[in-house]
């Protein structure tokens, strides 16, 4: 591996849980524009760890729709690259090795609580559905305290009271309070699946991503991820969080807004150019 600082490497990282919509396209477009501006590399990563929600047909649809819209990536599940595989479900060994490191160095503890956030931890917690602060029930536990046969997940112990700050390329300095704005979070689920937080940090580091461009509903997750980078003793990328698109009622655009999926817009006869020029797209 080269010791030189890598030149700009950006990524787009959709989860194939439905058809991509205008909100994705807009954030990904910013990511691609920044890659072009810096003469860098764009990576497409397939974030398919949520096996209950991700479907193979959405992976092919995602690649087709991204191509149609005008995205061009240099590394990805369809074209390979130096840091592949680019599909998260094929990278479980790497996540396990990072999990073991966190465990050996005492940053995480076993948790036997059967809470919703354990199950949901495999998907990115977008602002409206971010998890409640964990009350710390299992904080003092070690594996010795856990009866044989009990389901064990692993949580990251956040440094209560510490302010986690970073300079966001779009929004300026951002600060979050560990223990107050977010609590101990899952890194490894009892069924052997890493959380979104651990997988994304492992991949952005391993794929040498230099700047993460994504929606601002993930600002709080960036604070969590900065703690993981620090615990794993690796350099974090820079961050650039984009404003989100909302529907008429003020709700964040999500995959349930089928009418605004790229697929539906294409069927209606819209072209990528007309979409990119629309007022909704330019915000
Ligand atoms: N796969 C995540 C999502 O679609 C990506 C989050 C990220 O960019 O870190 O929400």
Image: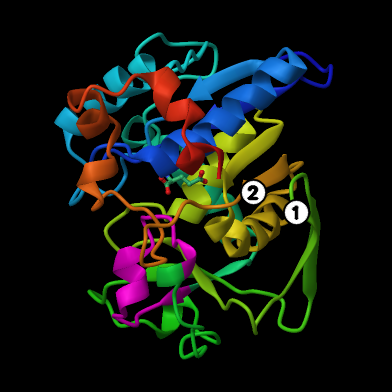
Magenta span: 110-127
Q: Secondary structure at mark 1?
A: loop
Which label belongs to residue 241? Answer: 2
Mark 2 packing: few (<14 Cα in 10 Å), some, or many (20+)? many
Side of 251 relative to 164 (left or right): left
Left or right position of 160 against 182: right
- At a point 18% along the width and 25% down the height, the residue shown is 267
Q: Indicate the quadrant where residue 60 lies.
A: top left
Q: Residue at x 84, y 16 (%)?
A: 4
Q: In the rendered view of the protein, which quadrant contains the C terminus? A: top right
How much space separates mark 1 and mark 2, taking CA atoms? 7 Å
In the image, what residue occupies the spot 36% across and 56% down? Answer: 122
Residue 268 shown in magenta: no
| Contact (Cβ within 8 Å) of mark 1 with mark 2 | yes
The residue to which callout 1 is attached is: 171
The residue lying toward the viewer, choosing from 72 and 250, is 250
Residue 260 position, x and y percent, is 29, 42
Q: Position of residue 78 (x, y in %)?
A: 34, 13
- Residue 180 vs residue 155, the one in the foreground: 180
Mark 1 Cα shell of 10 Å, populated few (<14), some (14-19), many (≥20): few
Of marks 1 and 2, which one's residue comes earlier in the chain?
A: 1
Q: In this orientation, which residue lies closer to the viewer: 196 or 105?
A: 196
Question: Height in image: 138 above or below 175?
Answer: below
Is residue 85 visible in the rendered image? The answer is no
Q: Considering the image in quadrants, where does the N terminus appear?
A: top right
């Amino acid at each position: 591996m080269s010791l030189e600082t890598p030149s700009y490497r950006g990524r787009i990282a959709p989860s194939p849980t439905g058809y991509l919509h205008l909100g994705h396209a807009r954030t990904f477009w910013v990511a691609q524009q920044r890659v072009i501006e810096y003469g860098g590399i764009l990576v497409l990563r397939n974030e398919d760890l949520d096996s209950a929600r991700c479907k193979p047909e959405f992976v092919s649809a995602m690649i087709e729709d991204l191509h149609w819209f005008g995205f061009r990536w240099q590394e990805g599940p369809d074209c390979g690259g130096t840091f592949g595989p680019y599909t998260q479900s094929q990278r479980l060994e790497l996540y396990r090795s990072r999990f073991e490191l966190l465990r050996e160095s005492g940053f995480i503890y076993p948790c036997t609580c059967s809470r919703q956030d354990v199950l949901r931890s495999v998907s990115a917690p977008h602002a409206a559905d971010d998890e409640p602060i964990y009350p710390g029930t299992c904080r003092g536990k070690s594996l010795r305290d856990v009866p044989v046969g009990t389901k064990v997940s692993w949580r990251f112990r956040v440094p209560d009271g510490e302010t986690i700050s970073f300079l966001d390329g779009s929004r300026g300095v951002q600060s979050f309070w560990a223990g107050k704005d977010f609590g101990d979070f899952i890194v490894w689920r009892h069924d052997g699946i890493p959380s979104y937080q651990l997988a994304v940090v492992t991949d952005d580091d391993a794929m040498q991503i230099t700047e993460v461009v994504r929606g601002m509903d993930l600002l709080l997750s960036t604070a969590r991820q900065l703690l993981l980078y620090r615990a794993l003793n690796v350099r974090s990328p820079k961050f650039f969080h984009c404003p989100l698109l909302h529907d008429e009622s003020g709700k964040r655009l999500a995959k349930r807004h089928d009418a605004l999926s790229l697929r539906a817009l294409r069927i209606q006869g819209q072209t990528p150019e007309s979409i990119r020029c629309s007022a909704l797209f330019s915000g």
